[in-house]
Image (cartoon, rainbow, N blue to C red):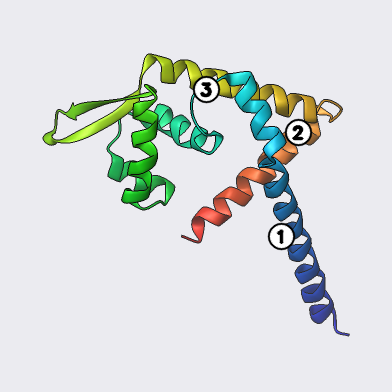
Amino acid sequence: MSVKTRQRVDRDAAVTEVEQAFTVLSRRATLPRMRAQLVEQVGAPIEPGLYPLLRRVGQWGPIRTSELAARIGLDVSTISRQLAGLERAGLLVRTVDPLDRRAALLALSQEGERIVERIQRARHAMMDEALADWPVEDLEQLAELLERFADALDAQR
C-alpha cells in the first residue's frame, strides 16, 4: 500500500471515529436524565429543548423573529410557534421595532433573564462535575478543538 493510500485510510478511519464520538456525545448530552436534572435545578416553566432558543434571544435580542430564524437555521413558522410558547410563559416580551413600526422585536423579560442565568449556572455546574478530574490544559484544548469543529461545520453552510 502506498503512503498516500495509507494516509487516506488513516484519515477516513479518524473521521469515522470523530463522527461516532460526536454521535455518542450528542445522544448523551440530550439524555432525558440530564434534561430532567436541568429542569429540576432551574425550575423553568418550559420544555428543555427551548432553553437554547431562549438563550439566543438573550444573546442577540432585541431581535426580529425572521433574523433569529435565519441565524439559527430554522424556518420562521417553526420558530414562531416555539417563541409563542416562551412568550405565553412570560419569558419573552415583544416590542415595536422603532426602525419599522410594522415589525416586532423580541427580548427576554425579567423572568426570562433570571431563567437564562439559572440555566447557565446549572449547565456550568453539570460540566464542571463531569470534567472535575480533567487538567486545565485538556479543558483548554477541548474548547479550542470544539470551536474549530463548530467553525468548520459553519463554513459548510
Looking at the rendering, which quadrant does residue 61 occupy?
top left
Q: CA distance from mark 2 to mark 3?
A: 29 Å
Name the amino acid type tagged 2.
Leu
Q: Is residue 59 left or right of residue 18?
A: left
Q: Which residue is disc 3 drawn over?
A: 44
Residue at image position (44%, 31%) is 54
Q: Earlier in the sequence, mark 2 or mark 3?
A: 3
Residue at image position (14%, 28%) is 98
Q: Is residue 6 left or right of residue 95?
A: right
Residue at image position (69%, 33%) is 34
Specify the label residue 103 is tagged with. none
Q: Is residue 7 left or right of residue 23?
A: right
Q: Earlier in the sequence, mark 2 or mark 1?
A: 1
Looking at the rendering, which quadrant does residue 90 occupy?
top left
Q: Which residue is disc 2 drawn over?
A: 139
Q: Which residue is disc 1 drawn over?
A: 19
As drawn, 15 above or below 49: below
- In the rendered image, the quadrant that contains the N terminus is bottom right
Name the amino acid type tagged 1.
Glu
Disc 2 to disc 1: CB gap under 8 Å:
no
